[in-house]
Image: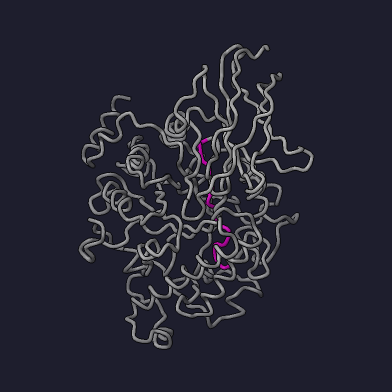
Amino acid sequence: MVKKIVVFTAVLLMTGIAARTHAQTPPKRELRAAWIATVANIDWPSRPGLPADEQKAEYIRLLDMLKRNGMNAVVVQVRPAADALYASDLEPWSYWLTGKQGDAPSPYYDPLQFMITETHKRGMEFHAWFNPYRAVFRTSMTVAPNHITRLRPQWFVTYGDTRYFNPGIPEVWTFVTRVIRDVVRRYDIDAVHFDDYFYPYRIRGKEFPDYRTYRTYGKDMSLDAWRRHNVDTVIRMLSKAIKEEKPWVKFGISPFGVWRNRDSDPRGSDTQASTTNYDDLYADILLWLKKGWIDYITPQLYWEFGHPTVAYETLVDWWAHHTYGRDLYIGQALYRIGSSRAWRNPAELPNQIKANRTYPEVKGSIYFSATSFYKNTLGFDDTLRNHLYRYPAIPPAMPWLDSIPPLPPRITGARKGPDGLHLLWQDGDTSRQTYQYVVYRYPGNVIGNLNDPRYILSVVGKDNTPDTAHIQTFTDRSYRKGQPYIYFITALDRLHNESLLSNKVYIRDTDE
């Protein structure tokens, strides 16, 4: 323990943020999420063609483990390569799901609907992760007869051993937008999420084969500016389409960790990255933030403190000063724990989370990837459960989407049962849809700091089943008989705006 404290102090003194981490209070509002990658069966399902019942069991086990580790959201890859992990009339069932592209799960079920239901049942957000341009993961793979590369071969190029949509073709913009609009319309997702794959990462000695398309559509733009224009156009179209379908569905991007180096642009970070979003992937993230086309940004900061060319402390500080009022979550390299000398320090990733919390602009983390948690490498899961994520957190609100909280609920009863203290309440909001409730418990007879998550017992979903007569319930299984407690409840809407407090219930002696 002493060794960890010494290392942490040294690192934070080096980064100039030690004072702000002293006696750090865990935040009440924080996104805590994990990426669940389906491509190449990285996280789920464990292999192609796994029977449907085993797929379901694996997902539930993964979800429950993430919940125990403090996560309040998952980011699930539902379209890895112009294929679908959901019922679609536009793209075939994914090979990674069934073992043969185009074949439905057996016995049949809709995996996306199942995953959303199970995720929401646990009070967690579901972010649907799409890859916009990758069409065939490996050119050696067999694609279904109705795959878009067969139906519209003129839209695609091959780069390396992967087939990509050509981002410069206007019909491609329309098709990609149509695919994602379809999911937003039909499924109860909380967010649309893209990762860092826009134009592909450069292959040494090979140019992306879109020059002929550039000659057709580039007009008076340079090649680089035209490529950025193409990606900008898709992002703008998607932003509009998502909000037209459901204004509360968020749009988030997880780019490569460096926008531009300072030696290329005075606005860039003090880094020497060999790849950047702006110059290599043609993703002008800052423009999208400035224009308000996206709701959150999750740069993948997969490096350690003190890295010689892309230091974590440099990049988290740079991104914190370039949010333009949108939410910033940090992409954390969970998979790297134990992989090198720097990452064999058990304090490396915990220190990154503590450093994040010194910036009010940083509102959470997303970890790559979910199954890495199973290993509990260097005890990181224990650190989350016992310390950093010991108490629940509510995802941040997004006032530019909605800032009006629901009306507070009304507690109608509290009674003792063999399994705990049962609270009963009714929703107080008839004009707006309450989505979740936050159950608070304070020891003694005084209400403390409302922003202290230690007093949150649980975040629970609203029970909308018809036979409940609008009565909601929660059982406090940890109360101690004879101890005085104050309980109250608040309501959350879909975007986590929180109501005022309900009436309070003071329990002096649970034998009464």
Q: In this orientation, does residue 343 appear?
A: no
Give the residue drawn at x 54%, y 37%. Answer: 500
Q: Nearer the viewer, residue 407 or 297?
A: 407
Give the residue drawn at x 21%, y 40%. Answer: 14
Q: Is residue 442 left or right of residue 347?
A: right
Q: In this orientation, does residue 286 appear?
A: yes
Image position, residue 73 (x, y; %): 53, 46
Q: Nearer the viewer, residue 62 or 158?
A: 62
Give the residue drawn at x 68%, y 62%. Answer: 87
Above or below, 261 against 69 in this view is: below
- Quadrant position of the C terminus in the picture: top right
Image position, residue 264 (x, y; %): 23, 66
Q: Is residue 410 left or right of residue 13?
A: right
Image position, residue 268 (x, y; %): 26, 60
Above or below, 222 against 23 in this view is: below
- Image-quadrant location for residue 38: bottom right
Count of numbered marks: 0
- Quadrant position of the N terminus in the picture: top left
Q: Nearer the viewer, residue 345 or 110?
A: 110
Image position, residue 188 (x, y; %): 63, 54
Highlighted magenta segment, given as a residue range = 69-82
